[in-house]
Image (cartoon, helix red, strand yellow):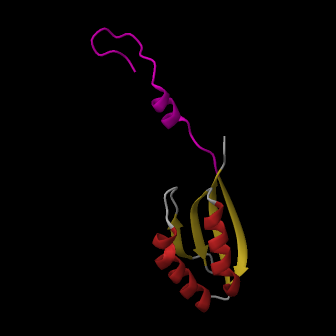
Amino acid sequence: MYCPSCGTPLTPSKKEREIKRPRKVRTEEFEVTGSELVERVKALIHEGNIRRITIKNQKGKTLIEIPLTIGVIGAALLPVLAAVGAIAALATKCTIAIERIEKN
């Protein structure tokens, strides 16, 4: 950034430097059976460093995407877990794809 009146370079604030720093995201995929699906999703949510969970069927079609944020409270996830339970009842095998945020 530059000063609009004189053109001298301005140093970014600490907050601006932190915002511009990209975070590394790693994607992992693994297969689970329908009976393991809900428990595995609960465990992943509990880990806390997961950014997004995607559940796919055997053919690779996305059934549900669950975006997770830092401030997600357990009660807010109850409808999502109910939907995952319904998918688990219908599916025999699923693939869970997760986006994990790596710590710097």
Q: Nearer the viewer, residue 40 or 61?
A: 40
Q: Is residue 39 left or right of residue 81?
A: right
The picture places residue 69, in percent across and down from the top left corner, at: 50, 58
Q: Is residue 68 left or right of residue 27?
A: left
**Quadrant housing the C terminus:** top right
Q: Which residues are magenta?
A: 1-25
Is residue 4 within the magenta segment?
yes
Q: Nearer the viewer, residue 76 or 94?
A: 76
The picture places residue 37, in percent across and down from the top left corner, at: 66, 80
Relative height, residue 15 to residue 31 (above, below): above
The picture places residue 45, in percent across and down from the top left corner, at: 61, 66
The picture places residue 41, in percent across and down from the top left corner, at: 63, 73
Residue 16 visible to an observer of this rendering: yes
Q: Residue at x 69, y 87 (%)?
A: 35
Q: Residue at x 56, y 80 (%)?
A: 84
Relative height, residue 30 to residue 86 (above, below): above
Q: Residue at x 69, y 62 (%)?
A: 28
Q: Is residue 79 left or right of residue 99?
A: left
Q: Main secondary structure of the magenta part?
A: loop
Relative height, residue 76 to residue 25 (above, below): below
Q: Nearer the viewer, residue 91 or 40?
A: 40
**Quadrant housing the N terminus:** top left
Residue 94 visible to an observer of this rendering: no
Q: Residue at x 55, y 36 (%)?
A: 21
